[in-house]
Image (cartoon, rainbow, N blue to C red):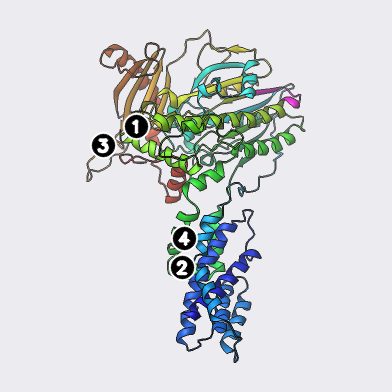
Amino acid sequence: MKCIFAAVAGATLSSILLVLVGAGWDLMDPMLRERLFLASLNGLFAGWLLGILVHFLGKKSLSRALLIGAAGGFAFASWFIGGLALAVVGAAIMRPFALKAKPMVVLGLALHLLPAAIFFGMRANWEIVPLLPAPELSNATSDQAPVDGSPDVVLIVCDTLRADAILDPEIPTPNLDALRARGAWAPFAEAPANQTLPSHLVLLAGFDIEKIGMRGNYSRWPASGLLKKNGNHPLASRFFEAGYRTAAVVTNPLLFQIKEGSGYQEFEEGFETWHGLAYEDSFVAFMDWARAHSMVGFVSNVTNPRFLSYPLHKLLDSDARRNYRVHYREGERTTDASLRYLEGLQKDDRPFFFLAQYFDPHSPYVPPSEYADTLATEAMTPDGYGRSVTDAFHMRVSLRDDLRDEVVADGGARGAYLHGLYKEEVAYFDEQVGRLIDSVEASGRPTLILFTSDHAEGFGEHRNVEHGETLFEEEYRIPFILAGPGVAPQELQQAPELIDAGFTLLELAGLNTEYFDGRNVLTTDAIAARPRLTVMIDQVALQDGPWLLHATMRYDDTLPRLPNEERLEAEPGVYDLEAIRLFHMVDDPQQNENILQQNPAQVEQMLAVIRERMKMDLYPFIPPRAFSPKEMGALSELGYALSEDEDPE
């Protein structure tokens, strides 16, 4: 055993030395805790393996065991030659130097506790985020010169922002309040879907939700060619072809991590510069380093890589930590990237169209320290939970599961606390978007600013937390503010739809709106509002005046089927449409009383409107979408988890 303890000491000390000198590590994120933890494991693995070897080869010398153990720490690192030389010396040495057995045994035993000491005694780095470099601002030009006096256009989209959040007196939003005071605004606008991909595609492609055929983040995705056959001409392309410079900073990875060669309609079409804030996967790089620079990593790689990567992933890169790191102060990185591009765009005489897409306050809710504990106070903390980010993560997951399983009827204390965290993130976001607005105003250039969101968020209302689960108003009512030249301060009398954002900007900039759905929000007050349609997978909602109707809508490919029953293809116009809920939103603003049975005529009238809209539904013309495990994992990490009875296709 003495040889084993000596070999453990040698292997551990050499492994730690390699970490401290930075051997083989060139990433932005130092990951010192993780690398030291791996080094301590490597010391135990190499030490026991080589110590046993020394013992059974009859080389029962503590000094030999120490040297050969150290060689094992070096050999599978960037100092391979040094490790090999040390091993040769250790094996060939004729007169080993003397080592006292008792101190060596104590040291070897103590080093067995080192992995636990590192794991519990060192804090993981949660603030250094390895952001990949941004592309340079492109300076492409179109053949068309912009019209003299054309305004700059800035479109700001805040992912997952409820309309009521920026009107809540409890939440400090001075920058958005100031923008609203000088512009046209509505208490709420309505999103066409309750998830990111379809809503953004409607906004940027300029087609109503049924004309893109998309229902949710897991659903079918239309090809660019298919939309163009129907005359589609995306928003950014129209600005670019009119002589505008076009650029975007996009934070939600779903909008830029599109499968290469898929043919899907891309969000970036028409943008000269498209910067998706992508992050280096530190853990993948860490595992590559472990396999190349440690004996334990090398052996794991030639047997089964998961023997090492799976437990390390669970220990060192938990879901809560991974999500926290990327999203902590994310709005600051979005604004910083936007300001760099705006600085370049504002030096050009040509007008520009710029998109800033923020991910705040999408879950996980991780307000910075200066906003933490202001609206989610210690007194609000639910029983059984702490106040760490990992507690908030598990609270969110458990509440979603309990609501789905009907264990609870509403969000209760957990929903209120999570809503408080969300509000703190909204306050932080206001600070960051204020920096962007200040830059626009300081330029002195005439600029249209339109601020909105893609969908909203629930906190236990109607058995729902987060979004993607229901078609109640907490999931689709979003903010809408328009300010700039030609926009008089006013409260809009009609609730806009998200599709109206692009149409309004095009008209105010004097550009062509042919084949672009929507209406100019500044000229619609004299026109009757159309019934507003919102969709999700297998459901639609229609709001017509005070009436809100929910209905299931399933093509043959998504109808319930027996385990051995053949899946049918979706056919145009062939679907099952069934009303399931009806609410009067004036008499019942919380939508608690289903009055479907009492109003058959109203139900049939609204179903007829849905059928008319669905004559243009592109869904059955789009092939099913296949998901790789990586794509499913990315969606799950963003909170889009399928329930047991759901099937993406």
Q: Amino acid at mark 3?
A: Pro
- Asked if the residue at tag 2 contacts the one at tag 4, i.e. Cβ–Cβ closer than 8 Å, the answer is yes
Q: Which residue is mark 2?
A: 300
Q: Which residue is mark 4?
A: 309
The first of marks 1 and 4 along the sequence is 4
Q: Amino acid at mark 2?
A: Ser
**On screen, 418 above or below 58?**
above
State how far apart marks 3 and 4 are (Cα): 39 Å
Query: Dot 2 surroundings within 10 Å: few (below 14), some, or many (20 or more)?
Result: some
State how far apart marks 4 and 2 are (Cα): 9 Å
Q: Which mark is residue 560?
A: 3
Q: Which residue is mark 1?
A: 538
Q: Position of residue 265 (x, y in %)?
A: 51, 38
Count the numbered circles shown.
Answer: 4
Q: Amino acid at mark 4?
A: Ser
Region of the chain picked out in magenta, as a range: 441-449
**On screen, 77 above or below 242?**
below
State yes or no: residue 446 in magenta: yes
Question: Which residue appears farthest toward the top when viewing the image?
Answer: 526
Question: Which residue appears farthest toward the front when viewing the image?
Answer: 102
Question: Which residue appears farthest toward the bottom when viewing the image?
Answer: 94
Q: Amino acid at mark 1?
A: Asp
Image quadrant for the C terminus?
Answer: top left
State how far apart marks 1 and 2 are (Cα): 45 Å
| Residue 625 or residue 547, whichever sits in front | 547
